[in-house]
Amino acid sequence: HVALQPSKYHYGFTGAAGVQRSQFQPCRASGDQQGDEVPGISGGASGGASGDWRAFRARLLVQHQQDQQSPQAPADPSQDAQDNVPSPTLVQEQGGGQHKRVLGSESESNMVLLQMQSPNLAAEGVWAHATGGLIEQGGILLATPCTSEVLANERLEQVVVFIAQDGSEGSVGLILNRPTALTLGKVRYALVNSPDSQLEKAFFGSRIYNGGATAQQVVHLLHCHALPQAVQVVPGVYLGGEAAAASLVLNGTLQPNDFKLIAGAIVWEPGQLQREVTAGCWYTAAASRSLVLKQCLQLPTPLWREVMLLCGGQYAQVADQAYEGDEVSGE
């Protein structure tokens, strides 16, 4: 057993006196670029996520599953090698195994909502797979059935956390599926500088998500657009770029729904997150940006359950057991 300190994550949005812009700079892998090095806007269905190696890894996992289930027909040498690799969307169709019927219907309901909210993200499809305890920047953490008990906080139940930063100085995560009752402008904020006044005007009425207990006065802007001053966490997923985002929303180029406003974060000291994973507090996974970036309001299938079903196997069984006898309801 791994000795863990009591959880320091106490939720409940504080209604802090000021909203600051996110200041931390996620570590970038070799070859990653900041948004301000990319002119214009990108990240649509045919845009910035095409170079995401995690999507290619997901395709390979699906191919491996299919090879185990049935003999592989000889490859057509006239086809490009990548054409023989299934689309990431097939993870939704194939990854669930015996849960295929349940996953198909429930994920389809979520996809209908995503098509209305963000057609470009919906066109990319959805995929997710477990990474067996591997903590990686841009990956996600899924609460296990014992998370709330071991970390002594029932509000961690079924959270989905995006790993925005992971390095020698520790890790930073943003909870994706905890929308609050607050919207920007509903509570009077003392904004700290002039760019934020534009941000409030552009995103007035936008839902604020509770990203974690640390620094809840800091609002992180999570999105898929390569904007000036935005930082790319993984291909196609960015944090920041508030001034450009506000300007483009105000002039009608982008929509407020293209962005998630996340107040606060979960912060782990070096080695702390790994100890929690080893203790069984978190499942680790990789997921498509369409799952990471979509709004989690009134989802027919809660995000935690959807991702667990997409991971298939034992994860799908855990999800089914968690909702056994209950009517599934949204976030």
Image: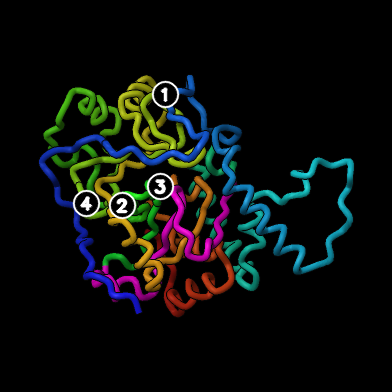
The residue lying at 44 percent from left, 55 percent from top is 140
Q: Are marks 1 and 4 in contact (CB under 8 Å)?
A: no
Alpha carbon of mark 4 to alpha carbon of mark 2: how far?
16 Å
The residue lying at 22 percent from left, 55 percent from top is 213
Q: Amino acid at mark 3?
A: Gln
In percent of width and height, residue 191 lies at: 15, 32
Disc 4 marks which residue? 214
Toward which corner of the image does residue 231 lie, by quadrant? top left
Q: Is residue 191 above or below residue 151?
A: above
Q: Is residue 73 above or below residue 124?
A: below
Read off the magenta span. 125-154
Mark before the other along the chain sequence, 2 or 3: 2
Q: Amino acid at mark 4?
A: Thr
Q: Amino acid at mark 1?
A: Asp
Q: Which mark is residue 295?
A: 3
Q: Are marks 3 and 4 in contact (CB under 8 Å)?
A: no
Depth check: 282 or 259 in front?
A: 282
In percent of width and height, residue 188 lies at: 12, 38
The residue lying at 84 percent from left, 42 percent from top is 79
Alpha carbon of mark 1 to alpha carbon of mark 4: how far?
27 Å
Q: Are marks 2 and 3 in contact (CB under 8 Å)?
A: yes
Mark before the other along the chain sequence, 4 or 2: 2
Toward which corner of the image does residue 261 lie, by quadrant? top left
Q: Is residue 178 above or below residue 16?
A: below
Q: Residues within 10 Å of mark 2 (few under 14, many from 20)?
A: many
Q: Residues within 10 Å of mark 3 (few under 14, many from 20)?
A: many
Decide if residue 174 is in sight here.
Answer: no
Q: Quadrant of the C terminus?
A: bottom left
Could you tell me which secondary element the residue under label 1 belongs to?
helix
Disc 1 marks which residue? 36
